Image (cartoon, rainbow, N blue to C red):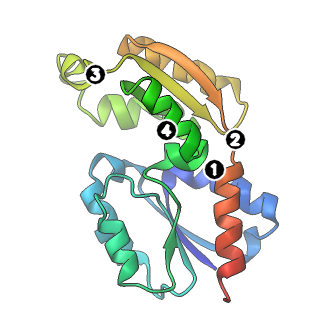
Amino acid sequence: MKIVACAALAGELRAVLGQLGIADEVAVTYLPANLHNRPERIVPALDGVAGDTDGLLVGYADCGTGGALDRWLAAHPGATRLPGAHCYEVFAGAELFATLHDAEPGTFYLTDFLARHFDALVWKGLGLDRHPELLTAYFAAYTRVVLLSQGDDPSVGAAAVAAAERLGLRFEHRPVGRGRLATSVAVAWRGRAA
């Protein structure tokens, strides 16, 4: 089996492949995590590395491609992607994510990876380091930060709290684990020869 995945999933994917006992049998290629700041570049990047797509698992949800990833998959039979609109839904599950979103649409979500790399991907990635006046424009409608954690590293929680404080938002923590990602990988693994 081959996986082409977002580098933001690297740690979680390695853990899941190890947990499933298939790490040595899966070839993984990672695309840069900062593609999320320019989702129109995800499919072209995927096109550049995918090769033979039979049995390929694309380690992305829609991730802001506006359906472009699903159109790419339709043109490449044998390839599948992670379920959901984004990695937050992949980790939390559709039901919990919908509940969180419906309760407070003005929520900024963090995964373990995004909490660790908040400075590079969000603060600098959105230009807030150079133009702090954009903070209000970007985050005026937000009311809270929710960490959807995959592991139990206390430094991730501390980084997420610091991110919420920097954004001037209330903080909430929801441990969600890697179970749903593991299920998606296991399903792709079982279906690779089907």
Residue to which mark 2 is pinned: 177
Q: CA distance from mark 4 to mark 1?
A: 25 Å
Mark 2 in CB contact with mark 3 (< 8 angstroms): no
Mark drawn on residue 98: 4
Q: Which mark is residue 139?
A: 3
Residue nearest the viewer, comparing 38 with 95: 95
Mark found first going from the N terminus, 2 or 4: 4
Which tag, 2 or 3, sits closer to the chain's start?
3
> Seen in the image, is 69 located left or right of residue 193?
left
- Which of the labelled discs sits on residue 11, or is there none? 1
Q: Is residue 193 left or right of residue 143?
A: right
From this view, report whether residue 164 is shown above or below residue 15.
above
Whether residue 119 can be seen here? yes
Mark whose residue sits in front, 1 or 2:
2
Q: Residues within 10 Å of mark 2 (few under 14, many from 20)?
A: some
Q: Tell me the element at label 2.
A: loop
CB under 8 Å between discs 4 and 1: no
Which of the labelled discs sits on residue 31, or is there none?
none
Please name the amino acid that badge 3 sits on. Answer: Phe
Tag 2: residue type? Gly
Closer to the N terminus: mark 4 or mark 1? 1
Corner quadrant of residue 74:
bottom left
Q: Position of residue 43 (x, y in %)?
A: 32, 68
**Identity of the amino acid at label 1?**
Gly
